[in-house]
Amino acid sequence: MLRQVLLATSRSGRTRKLVETAPYSRDVVRRFIAGEATDDALDVTAKLTGQGLSVTLDHLGEDTLDAGQATATVRAYVALLERLAVTGLGDRAEVSVKLTALGQAFDEELAVGNARRVCAAARAAGTTVTLDMEDHTTVGSTLRILRELREDFPGTGAVIQSYLRRAEEYCADLAGEGSRVRLCKGAYAAPETVAFSGRDEIDRSYVRCTKVLMAGRGYPMLATHDPRLIDIAGSLALLNDRAAKGFEYQMLYGIRPQEQRRLAEQGWQVRVYVPYGEQWYGYMMRRLAERPANLMFFVRSLATRS
């Protein structure tokens, strides 16, 4: 019920106005979102990389419904990547792209062409692209586009969500040489036939997927803030003789920053997912809907700030 309320709130213009104008709320939001402009994203990237962390940047925007919006998103990514090249941050920062922001929902071929432009700009900047995974209805299309892009851009990363019942199968298919795979829990609404709904089931699936990726020949990118899953991943790395540089942990910007630095100081690879852009409100509300603990974290932050 709480998830449905938050998802509905993410589409409410009235609630957005209240959040944006509430005292202190914008300061708290900036703990989790770099800002609205490219300069904001670059400032945060420089700060995090200076702490020994890597970064993946997400220009916020999805569910694009016309070609003009998709083109604007491509231009934003190309501009960002050009700036990463100029500042020399390309070796420590990549980009994450939602295919729905590139037109996937209404024209898959358009999305492929737009994704190619972003991938080409990333290669010119000396970095890579990871295709975010969205709700279960987009999985087949996203994996098709991934395969097509990897023909020319083999470093393109994939995302698999452990809440999907076929997650382990997907991981096995993607665990080959050179394949970059981000594993996250995922929390989009999906029918019981497609996805696990219980926390324990999702966690067990996450562990099974981690085992597959760690035993494979690809590069696992383990997106979790769960201390148990972090410890399990470390143990599996040792069990599979996987060096610290052979995989990475990923965490969201503003969530457990001390743990991010602790893991990096221990020699592990840690990448921070940094969102930015004007469409921050919808992103924030969806993150709260995905995990109730995030809502409490946000409320505590508001209380501390105020």
Image (cartoon, grey):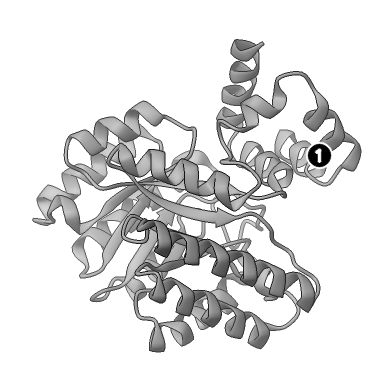
| Circle 1 crowding by C-alpha within 10 Å: few under 14, some 14–19, many from 20 | some
As drawn, the residue found furthest toward the left would be: 241
Any part of residue 9 in sight? yes
Q: Amino acid at mark 1?
A: Thr
**Image-based side of 83 in relation to 278, left or right:** left
The residue depicted at 63 percent of the width and 80 percent of the height is: 111
Relative image position of residue 83 (x, y in whole percent): 48, 61
Q: Residue furthest right?
A: 14
**For numbered disc 1, what is the local secondary structure?**
helix
Q: Is residue 298 above or below residue 245?
A: above
Residue 278 in picture, x, y percent from top left: 71, 49
Q: Which residue is mark 1?
A: 9
Please state the horizontal and vertical placement of residue 279, each as a whole percent of the image. Answer: 72, 49
Position of residue 2 relative to residue 184, above or below, is above
Q: Nearer the viewer, residue 136 or 221?
A: 221
As drawn, 224 above or below 196:
above
105, 198: nearer the viewer = 105
Q: Position of residue 82 (x, y in %)?
A: 48, 67
Q: Quadrant of residue 176?
A: bottom left
User: Residue visible at 49% across and 33% down?
Assistant: 254
Quadrant that contains the C terminus: top right
